[in-house]
Amino acid sequence: MAMQRLGSDPPGPYEDLVGYSRVVRAGAHVWVAGCTSVDELGLVLGVTPGEQMTYAIANLVKALERVGATAADVVRTRMYTTDTSRWEEIGRAHGEVFGAVRPVTAMIGVESLLDPRMLVEIEADAFVEPDSGR
């Protein structure tokens, strides 16, 4: 399988400016760049960190699917938040999707994200089993 480098569909507001792909697949390995709760119109969805994490994970899963992977293939996530005191609601949103998958993970407190309305961001690495047919 040739390496795939794909942007968001539709393209996100930062991809061309910064020069990065939303998702890269090389063989069985998949990497998804940081996803926030920004929708296709560039609007930040969700008010609370938990709500935003739910939208951010949906964007991450959409990126995985573009290269033939699923949430079940995720082996590592990294969560970033501007408010670590809200870790439980962020973790709960993560657990709703990845609770049975159990990827290794980290939740990291940061001072800010690119847009002050963004409260969380998530990135992931995945491994698609060679015998899965995907």
Image (tube, helix red, strand yellow):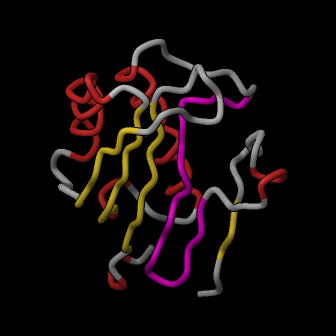
Which quarter of the image is occupied by the N terminus? bottom right
Magenta segment: 23-40
| Residue 32 at x, y percent in the picture | 52, 59
Count the numbered circles shown. Answer: 0
| Residue 110 at x, y percent in the picture | 44, 39
Q: Residue drawn at (56%, 19%), measured in percent from left and top?
A: 45
Classify 62 as above or below 83.
below
Classify 70 as above or below 98.
below
Q: Residue drawn at (20%, 27%), measured in percent from left and top?
A: 88
In the image shown, does 37 or 118 lie closer to the viewer? 118
In this rendering, position of residue 85 left or right of residue 39: left
Q: Quadrant of residue 130?
A: bottom left
| Residue 46 at x, y percent in the picture | 49, 16
Q: Residue drawn at (64%, 81%), measured in percent from left and top?
A: 3
Classify 131 as above or below 60.
below
- Overall secondary structure of the magenta stretch? strand
In this rendering, position of residue 134 left or right of residue 113: left
The reply to whether the magenta stretch includes residue 36 is yes
Q: Quadrant of residue 5?
A: bottom right
- In this view, which residue lies farthest toward the right? 17
| Residue 59 at x, y percent in the picture | 53, 40
In the image shown, does 133 or 98 lie closer to the viewer? 98
Which quarter of the image is occupied by the C terminus? bottom left
